[in-house]
Image (cartoon, rainbow, N blue to C red):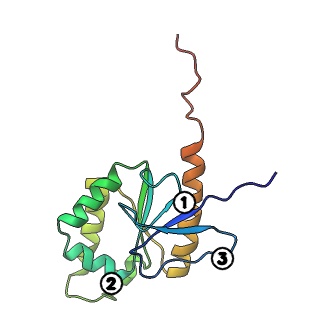
């Protein structure tokens, strides 16, 4: 029997969507949070993709919309931000804008501490693309598995 591959949902507002080839089904739908999810898990699982310029710009303009997004993500079972760059790129100020690298890195740490949403620095778009697919599929497997405490008899 063939194993069904979960369909990755790509937000309709995602301007440069990842492509995984014909073996990975995808579908474009407006997501409430993030850029990528998996069909049937849209309210539980998301990946927010950011280029370095987008990430730093979002941090510097971090208004109510971004904080609302972080709050929604914090309430999900599995939610992460993927940055298509490395912290060294921040240190070298390889982004637009005048924000100090220490401010950018400090704000990224604060997001993780305040909201519990991890930020993964991927180094490149290609690595981020591959990692995002692997993360989404692993998260679905984890979220759909029976919990260890289910089925145990209470004494």
Dot placed on the residue nearer the N-terminal end, 1 or 3: 3
Is residue 116 at all visible to an observer of this figure? no
Above or below, 45 against 125 in this view is above
Residue for point 53% across, 58% down: 38
Above or below, 151 against 12 in this view is above
| Residue 22: % across, % down | 68, 75
Residue receiving disc 1: 136
Residue for point 55% across, 34% down: 147
Q: Please state if 115 lies on the left or on the right of 124 as rendered.
A: left
Above or below, 134 against 147 in this view is below
Q: Which mark is residue 53?
A: 2
| Residue 7: % across, % down | 59, 61
Quarter of image, res 117: bottom left
Residue for point 49% across, 78% down: 17
- Badge 2: few (under 14), some or many (20 or more) residues near its Cα, within 10 Å? some
- Mark 1–mark 3 Cα distance, whole angstroms, equals 16 Å
- Badge 3: few (under 14), some or many (20 or more) residues near its Cα, within 10 Å? few
- Mark 3–mark 2 Cα distance, whole angstroms, equals 27 Å
Above or below, 147 against 122 in this view is above
**Residue closer to the observer: 21 or 106:** 21
Per the image, label 3 sits on a secondary structure element best described as loop
- Mark 2–mark 1 Cα distance, whole angstroms, equals 24 Å
Dot placed on the residue nearer the N-terminal end, 3 or 2: 3
Dot placed on the residue nearer the N-terminal end, 2 or 1: 2
Tag in front: 3 or 2: 3
Q: Please state if 43 lies on the left or on the right of 57 as rendered.
A: right
Q: Which mark is residue 75?
A: none
Residue receiving disc 3: 21
**Residue closer to the observer: 80 or 105:** 80
Q: Residue furthest top?
A: 155
């Amino acid at each position: 029997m063939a194993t069904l591959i979960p369909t990755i949902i790509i937000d309709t507002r995602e301007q440069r969507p990842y492509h995984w080839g014909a073996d990975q089904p995808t579908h474009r739908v407006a997501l409430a949070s993030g850029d990528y999810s998996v069909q049937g898990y849209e309210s539980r699982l998301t990946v927010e993709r950011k280029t370095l310029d987008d990430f730093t710009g979002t941090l510097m303009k971090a208004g109510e919309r971004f904080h609302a997004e972080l709050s929604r993500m914090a309430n999900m079972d599995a939610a992460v931000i993927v940055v298509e760059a490395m912290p060294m790129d921040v240190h070298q100020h390889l982004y637009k804008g005048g924000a100090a690298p220490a401010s950018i890195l400090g704000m990224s740490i604060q997001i993780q501490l305040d909201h519990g949403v991890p930020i993964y620095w991927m180094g490149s778009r290609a690595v981020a693309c591959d990692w995002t697919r692997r993360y989404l599929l692993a998260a679905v497997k984890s979220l759909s598995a029976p919990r260890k405490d289910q089925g145990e008899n209470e004494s």
